[in-house]
Amino acid sequence: MQRYFSETLSNNSFRLKDDDIYHIKKVMRMKINDLIEVVYKKKVYLCIIKSLEPFICEIDKELDMNNENEYKIILIQSMVNETKMDLILQKGTEVGINEFYPYNAVNSVNKDNGKMDKKIMRWQRIVKEAAEQSKRNIIPTVHNSMKISDISKINGDLKLLLSVNECQVTLKSILQNHRDYDTIIIVVGPEGGFTKEEEQTFINNGYTRISIGKRVLRSETAGVAVSSMINYEWMV
């Protein structure tokens, strides 16, 4: 069943965005009395389409569905090219990431060129569609691009720095020994890797340099892979 998000409830009816209404009518070709799911304030409702012109969908009942983790995952992702960033946002949303911070690393290929507002609008649309497809109860947030000086502003209980340099601490050991984290931050470097100065700055701000195995993952793979590992280890 198709899922949509709404921010407005009035007279037992949800107001959907124009793009969603177009999708319902023109892409899905739904008809009167067809059912959809609508998420409002993290709760899921089964709704009946009562009218197409104008579009009206009324609540039939609230559904007991919560597909969110008990913990929050934040991904600080070094900027990569647009195609790869789209993939990170889409798949990251599917595996349960809650917030995305694009990071202007020294070796980032795709820098913040002053058009970040347009990019974030596009990226927010990508995570919304991915949240609907994967039956999330929230739409993840895509923040403005951050610099190395912004690190201390992002708070988390567990701060993980994925490093290609040799290190003894593994993700597996951390996850098996600790299960009481509310917010986990994952930092992924660019294709050219972090500079020594960048890596040290993260470490000075409480990040633990970790290894996730012998193989080196691409930047667009790493964050999604680590999030999936966390979900598997803490699955209830």
Image (cartoon, grey):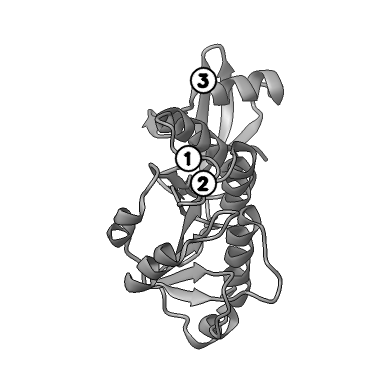
- Measured Cα–Cα span from mark 3 to mark 2: 31 Å
Q: Which label lies toward us, 2 or 1?
A: 1
Which amino acid type is shown beneath numbered disc 3? Answer: Asp
Question: Mark 1 vs mark 3: which is more N-terminal?
Answer: 3
Q: Farthest residue toward the top?
A: 53
Identity of the residue drawn at 63% across and 72% down: 232
Question: Mark 3 vs mark 2: which is more N-terminal?
Answer: 3
**Quadrant assignment for the N terminus:** top right
Which amino acid type is shown beneath numbered disc 2? Answer: Met
Check disc 2 and report the residue beneath it: 79
Q: Is residue 10 left or right of residue 79?
A: left
Question: Mark 2 vs mark 1: which is more N-terminal?
Answer: 2
Identity of the residue drawn at 47% across and 40% down: 111
The numbered dot on residue 211 is none
User: Vertically, is 142 above or below 194?
Assistant: above
The numbered dot on residue 18 is 3
Instruction: Assign a secondary structure to mark 3.
Output: helix
Question: Mark 1 near mark 3, Cβ–Cβ under 8 Å?
Answer: no
Out of 87 and 136, give the one closest to the viewer: 87
- Measured Cα–Cα span from mark 1 to mark 3: 32 Å
Out of 176 and 206, give the one closest to the viewer: 206
Instruction: Assign a secondary structure to mark 2.
Output: loop
Residue 216, picture quadrant: bottom right
Which amino acid type is shown beneath numbered disc 1? Answer: Lys
